[in-house]
Amino acid sequence: MAVELPMKKLDDYRIFAEEDVEEIRELGQQLRGLKVVHVNATAYGGGVAELLMTIVPLMRDAGLDARWEVLEAPAEFFNVTKKLHNTLQGANIEISDEEWALYERVNEENAKKLNLDADVVIIHDPQPAYVPLYSDGKNAKYIWRCHIDTSTPNMKVWNRLTSKMGFYQKALFHMMDYVKPPFDKIAVEFPPSIDPLSHKNMEMSEQELKKVADRYGIDLDKPLMTVVARFDPWKDLFSAIDVYRIVKEKHDVQLAIVSSMAKDDPEGWIFFEDVLRYAGTDRDILFLTDLKGVGHKEVNAIQRLSTLGLHTATREGFGLVISEMMWKNHPVVARPVGGVKIQIDDGVSGYLRNDVKELADAVSNLLENKSLLDEMGKKAKEKVRKTYLSTANLQRYLKVIESIVD
């Protein structure tokens, strides 16, 4: 299924990254007219969809014939791919032969349904990883873009999955730490990005912010700790609540848990209920989700209204929510996992801590030192401006594409 795309212009990003835009224009001239299609599991919910909603339109503006296609699949398929996702992050879960057969069948069906008429096909994550296996587009070049922390995968599952993935010319990982055979010879380090002009990151007026605060019961007189994460066991939102409770002993704070319920994550609903029960009836723990009308603009506002960011995930492919919070001039206190540890410079733009008590102490330290909080916030934004904006990401894509079509 083709995804309808907004119009985006590279020139609008010059204010943030003039040099990147110039280089993208040059690369775009060399690749002008090249057909590129991105394939992933869902058009909304989760970081991959957000990335593609910016990158594909900007690819078009750079001169490429770029499109975005999404799988059509039953709920049972997403139950299997959630297992696949978890095992690739190290979970000791069995995937039955029947589940593997369903996975392959849905990929084969989609290979016939999707419009894969392209020079380059970029497959995102495990869900559609076998689509090229059954595609008629034999002349296309294939790239696998993995957004998962595969540093310590369940090797039985990893080996079975990748045994049929020899058709990829390049494999893109957030960090080289995630690379395993058979991709070690074709892997590229490829961090993702945020769009500074998206509804989730654009500037907002004080009036707009106050309206969101009023709507969702955010007390502007209290510090606000904010976690933005899917309802997923790897995000360990129980620890976020534990950190809040320790900090609450010394400071009258609020905790906002901000999330959306993704179409391809049926397990999320179960975990959502578990976290709700764990939070109990504390009025200073705010659950702000799309079920209450929280969209990208509301997430933006909540992050801007925050005092600092908190992230307690035990595994994280990259964690763009870190860069999003940093872009709003806020330091983030987080566990040093996956891509989180390369976004936050410990003691400079936030704190990296493992233990719940240490996380809580780091939060308290910031709440007690306003000048430190502000200074770290400024450094956090500058780190994102230099490294994790959409223009840098698009530049990386065009260089990889250029390397396989020459």
Image (cartoon, helix red, strand yellow):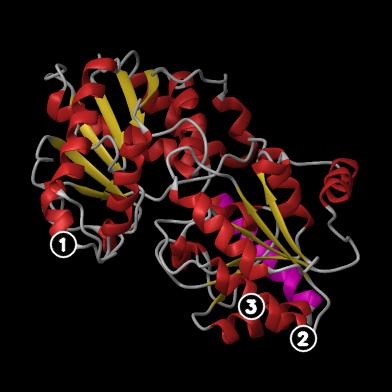
* Residue 387 visible at all: no
Question: Mark 1 sits on what residue?
Answer: 155
In x, y percent, where is residue 70?
38, 26
In x, y percent, where is residue 230?
53, 53
Q: Residues within 10 Å of mark 2 (few under 14, many from 20)?
A: few
Q: CA distance from mark 2 to mark 1?
A: 43 Å
Tell me which label, 3 or 1, sits earlier in the chain: 1
Badge 3 amino acid: Val
Question: Magenta stretch: residue 26 in it?
Answer: no
Q: Which residues are magenta?
A: 370-385
Badge 2 amino acid: Glu
Question: Magenta stretch: residue 379 in it?
Answer: yes
Secondary structure at numbered mark 2 = loop
In x, y percent, where is residue 194?
54, 44
- In front here: 222 or 92? 92
Q: Residue at x 64, y 56 (%)?
A: 325
Secondary structure at numbered mark 1 = helix
Question: Mark 3 sits on what residue?
Answer: 243
Question: Mark 2 sits on what residue?
Answer: 249
Q: Residue at x 17, y 55 (%)?
A: 157
- In front here: 324 or 262? 262
